[in-house]
Image: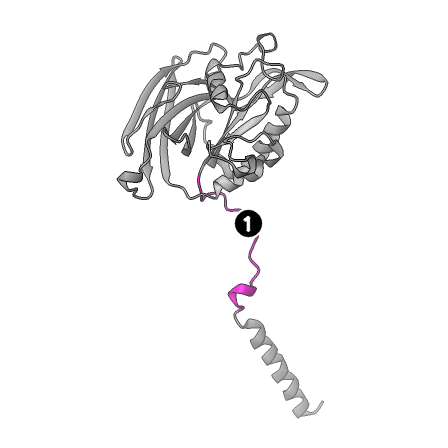
Amino acid sequence: MKLSTRYTILTALALTILVSCKPMPESERLIPNEMETTKGRAVLIEDYSGVLCINCPKAANGITKAAEAYGDKVVIVALHGSTTDVGTPPEEDPKGLYSPEAATYFERLQAGGSLPVATFNRRSLTSSGGKTYSDSYTQWPAVMQSVRELPQLYKIDLQVSESDRKVTTRCTATALEQTEAATAPELYLQLWLIEDNIVAPQHISTKVINDFQHNHIFRQTLNGIDGEAYQLGQSYDKTSAIEREVINPDHCAVVAILYDHKTGEVYEVAKAQLHPAPATK
């Protein structure tokens, strides 16, 4: 090979390397398609369900799977507040899934008799014609995602403990941004007790599964049906008795809900187990 030809080849290779190492414009770089799971507003999903509702397990399973990626940023509560032919009548309810308090919330929702239906931070939903609930469970993951994308306005610090069937809760909420007094919401704080791993009957299609595992079940309020007025930055301390006999405290959690008492909209939600599992090394 001639010397000039060798130099030509080496020069071409050098130029190739230089071009390859040139920084790529930001707009042309490959960006990993990773879902943001920490930022954005926490979502309270109130899933109104029933033992006789054959579509309720499918709806609950779908939204639970969609929420998994977000951890505690999405809190699901299943409320049995109907005793109709798609609800939870006494003869089908050996573990007391039905709650009179859940019935009050369901009546306020004015969703009619159909189940399942769900609310998402109790916001008006464009996909449901401005209603505060969705009765189309196939749309629930998309609705959840749209609420998640709203900016987070508040932060909740929640600490709970239980002894002798009495729940002690300490909760403090703070604003992430300053709000003008004229536009500040009338904040209330609700405390709910929920339970997982309840084995009880459930109708699915044409059969009854007697050992169905029910999760996120609303058990009772800990500070009244509407909660209590709350002042930002103050420690809210409450001790409440567990009133439901069938509850296993090891499977229970407290849900703290910060909402606007005038509009009903939930701004932030947090959940804490009564008896957290020991940390693994």
Task: Please name whichever residue, 106 or 70, is drawn nearer the observer in this view of the structure.
Answer: 106
Which class describes the residues within 10 Å of circle 1: few (<14), some (14-19), or many (20+)? few
Q: Residue furthest top?
A: 91
Q: Which of the 4 image quarters holds residue 239?
A: top left
Can you give x and y, in whole percent of width and height, for residue 206 in the image? 72, 18
Indicate left or right for 157 with 135 as reference: left
Residue range corresponding to the magenta coloring? 24-41
Magenta run includes residue 28:
yes
Which colour style is shown?
one colour
- Determine the residue positioned at 53% across, 12% down: 96
Query: Which residue corresponds to the image point at 66% horizontal and 92% vertical from the top-left?
Result: 4
For mark 1, what is the residue? 34
Q: Helix or strand or loop: what does disc 1 sit on?
A: loop
Q: Is residue 103 left or right of residue 202?
A: left
User: Magenta region, mostly helix, strand or loop?
Assistant: loop
Give the total of numbered labels.
1
Q: Is residue 152 above or below residue 257?
A: below
The percent position of residue 57, horizontal first and vertical second, equals: 62, 25
Q: Is 125 above or below relative to 164?
A: below
224 vs 105, nearest the viewer: 105
Q: Which sits in the foreground, 228 or 161? A: 228
Location of residue 252 in the rendering, given as x and y in whole percent from the top left corner: 47, 21
